[in-house]
Amino acid sequence: MSNDRIDSNMEDLVEETAEELAVNAQEYSEEIEKTIANTDGDPCNSYEWSILFLLILMAAVTAMCFHVWTLWKRRASLSAYDILFVAFFFAAAVQFGPMMSQVLHSGHGVYHFSQSGCKLLFFTDYGMRHVIAYLVLAFFAHAYLVVFHSFDEDNLDGRMRASVPWFIISIFVVEGIFGMVPAIYVDVGPKSLQSCVWTSTMSLSMAQIVSMEIMLRPITPYLLPMLLLSYPLVRMTLVVKSMDQTKARSTLKSILVIVWSYFALNLPYAILLVAESVGHITRDKGISWMTVCNLKWVFFLMHQAWFLAVPLAAMALDAERGNKPPGSDLALDVWTKVKTQVEDSRKRIA
């Protein structure tokens, strides 16, 4: 009986200690949130920023769905570029889940967390960032082989179509490598904390937590690829610029737009994440967190705008190649009829 009581007391002590560590690990973040919350009004303008996010999201989803419909119409002869876009479409659709969750929490005060929900959220958020980066590298690799290794584009398309199963497996591997560890070590926070926290069974300091977040959020998906591709990307841009106008050049230009815009639109967001994390570690009292949270929204919207830039680049490539999007003839007929009726009405009035 005494042993059972000791075991029960030990379990209670472990549970209390676990909750204490979870609170300590989130202590500084909670202080910042309280500072912002105690400020009159909405100092981060989260509601307004969230509405802009939803507008960009709807535009991106509409553009992606429209181009996927175009690809479906010619699915029998998809190129390597088209296959990469289809993979991007599904990866972006999954990535929009964590983005929407973040916006609902910050802009609309919707908080509902569970153990499985936190793990799925972190698995998707951290893993899919790296899948998107992997697809950007794949776009670049496609262009690099054509430009610097004289690969025939049609031959490359055939190889890509034959390797689609392995390509899909590689995407799941990347997602698993970078998403599994955060998912394992995250838990739903105590009731006093309406958030997901790093597991309270480990004695992690703020510096350890933030260092891991810096590595997996801004560095490996954004800053490291940019560092690796800076020189070859500039070199490729100069080569493509000097090429004669061909089908291959059009594809290469579109890929350059996708890769350059990925770095340009994500770099400010990545740098701010690093600066914010350093501020958490140093606990710098001189930082204006209201300014930081507004800048974070601006750069987050730039980050989101890249998901609109990719389908627009793909549609521009189709237009340059003379491929008519589905429904374009019908839309042109309707527009011609409407225009004719308007002109007739003006003549009658005159």
Image: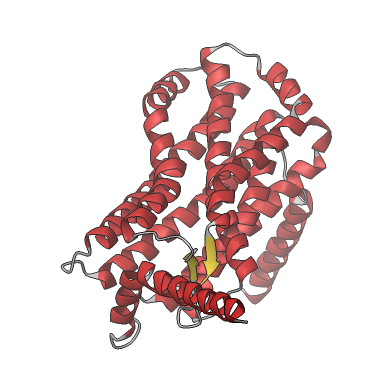
Rendering colour mode: secondary structure
| Nearest to the observer: residue 97 or residue 259 | 97
Q: Is residue 328 above or below residue 29?
A: above
Q: Quadrant of residue 176?
A: top right
Q: Residue at x 41, y 23 (%)?
A: 232
Residue at horizontal 39 percent and vertical 59 percent from the top = 204
The quadrant of the rendering that contains the N terminus is bottom right
Specify the farthest residue to the front: 2
- Residue 112 visible: no
Residue 342 is situated, as x and y percent measured from the top left of the image, at 67, 68
| 305 lies above or below 79 | below
**Residue 157 image-quadrant placement:** top right
Q: Measuring 55% from the left and 69% from the top, which residue is drawn there?
A: 101
Q: Position of residue 266 (x, y in %)?
A: 41, 48
Q: Is residue 109 visible?
A: yes
Query: Number of numbered discs present?
Result: 0
Q: Quadrant of the C terminus?
A: bottom right
Percent across and percent down for residue 304 are: 49, 56
Going by the picture, which residue comes out furthest to the top? 150
Q: Position of residue 208 (x, y in %)?
A: 36, 54
Image-based side of 126 in relation to 269, left or right? right
